[in-house]
Amino acid sequence: MSSGVPHTGRVALVTGGAHGIGLACVRALANCGARVHVADLDGDEARAVAHEVGGVAHEVDLADGVDGLPADVDILVNNAGSQHVAPIHEFPPPMFARLQQVMVTAPFLLIRQVLPHMYSQGWGRIVNISSAHGLRASAFKSGYVAAKHALEGLSKVAALEGAPHGVTSNCVNPGYVRTRLVEDQIAAQAQAHGISTGEVVERIMLDRSAVKRLIEPDDVADVVLWLCGPHSGHVTGTSIAMDGGWTAS
C-alpha cells in the first residue's frame, strides 16, 4: 500500500466502502491522511470500517438517491455496484433499472453534488470504479455492461467540464478482483463443473485474461491513490485497464 500523508485535511467519500475494493480504497485514503466518509448499504459494516479509520459512516441504498451524503468532498470514489446475470429476454426490468440507478444515476448525482465545492477550491479528484466490462461486453450481463459503459461516458464529461477548475475524473477498470462476491462465484462454479477452484479461476473466469490470477483489492486502491496524487494532474478523462491484458486482444 502507498505510504505518506498527501491528503491530510482533505475529505473523501467512498461508496460501497464497507467491502472489497471500496474497503481497500477507504483504508488507503485514510492512511494518506484523508477523513473518509464510508457509504454502504451494509450499515453495520460501514460503521465498523468508519470506526477503524476514524471516518464517518453512512447507511444508504443508492438506488433511492444520495440524500444525507456530504457535498464538501475533495475526493469522490464512485465504487458501489452490483451484478445480475440473465439473458436479455429474461432480464427483469426492475433489476435492470436498479443497476442503472446504483451505478449511473447515483454517481451522476454525487458528482453534481460535489463539483461546486471542488470548483470553489480549484482542486478535486473523481475516480469511478468501472470494470473491464466498461470497455468490453459479456453475454448475460446487459444491466452491468450498460451501466459501466454509461459510467465511462459520464466520467469523460466530468473530466472535460472539470479541467478548467483543477478537477480530474477518471475510470479504473479492473478485471476479476479477489472480493467476497467473486470468491463465492468461484466456489459455485467449482461445484457446478466438478473442478478445482484454481481451474475455475484460470479456465473460466480468466479465460480472456493473459495474466491468470485474480487482482487484489489493494492493487486497485493503489491506482486510485495515484489518480488522486500530486503527479496525476494531467491524467483525466481516461480509463485505466487493470484486466491482466483482457482488453488487449
Image (tube, rainbow, N blue to C red):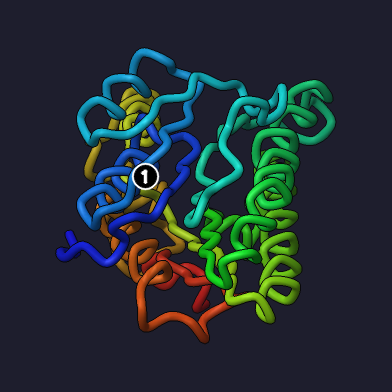
Residue 20 sits in which quadrant?
top left
Is residue 8 shown to the viewer in this render? yes
Is residue 189 shown to the viewer in this render? no
> Is disc 1 placed on a helix, strand or loop?
helix
Q: Residue at x 47, y 69 (%)?
A: 241
Q: Residue at x 20, y 51 (%)?
A: 31
| Vertical placement of residue 249 versus 30, above or below | below
Q: x, y percentage for residue 184?
A: 35, 26
| Vertical placement of residue 145 versus 211, above or below | above
Q: Residue at x 63, y 50 (%)?
A: 114
Q: x, y percentage for residue 41?
A: 50, 21
Residue 192 sits in which quadrant?
top left
Q: x, y percentage for residue 245?
A: 41, 73
Q: Nearer the viewer, residue 26 or 124?
A: 124
Q: Residue at x 48, y 71 (%)?
A: 240
* Left or right position of 167 against 112: left
For disc 1, the neighbor class at 10 Å (few under 14, some 14 to 19, many from 20) is many
| Vertical placement of residue 173 versus 88, above or below | below
Quadrant, the N terminus? bottom left
Amino acid type, mark 1:
Ile
Q: Nearer the viewer, residue 136 or 153?
A: 153
* Left or right position of 73 against 244: right
| Vertical placement of residue 165 versus 117, above or below | below
Residue under pointer 1: 21
Q: x, y percentage for residue 73?
A: 52, 49
In the rendered image, the residue lying farthest to the top is 44
Q: Nearer the viewer, residue 5 or 203?
A: 5
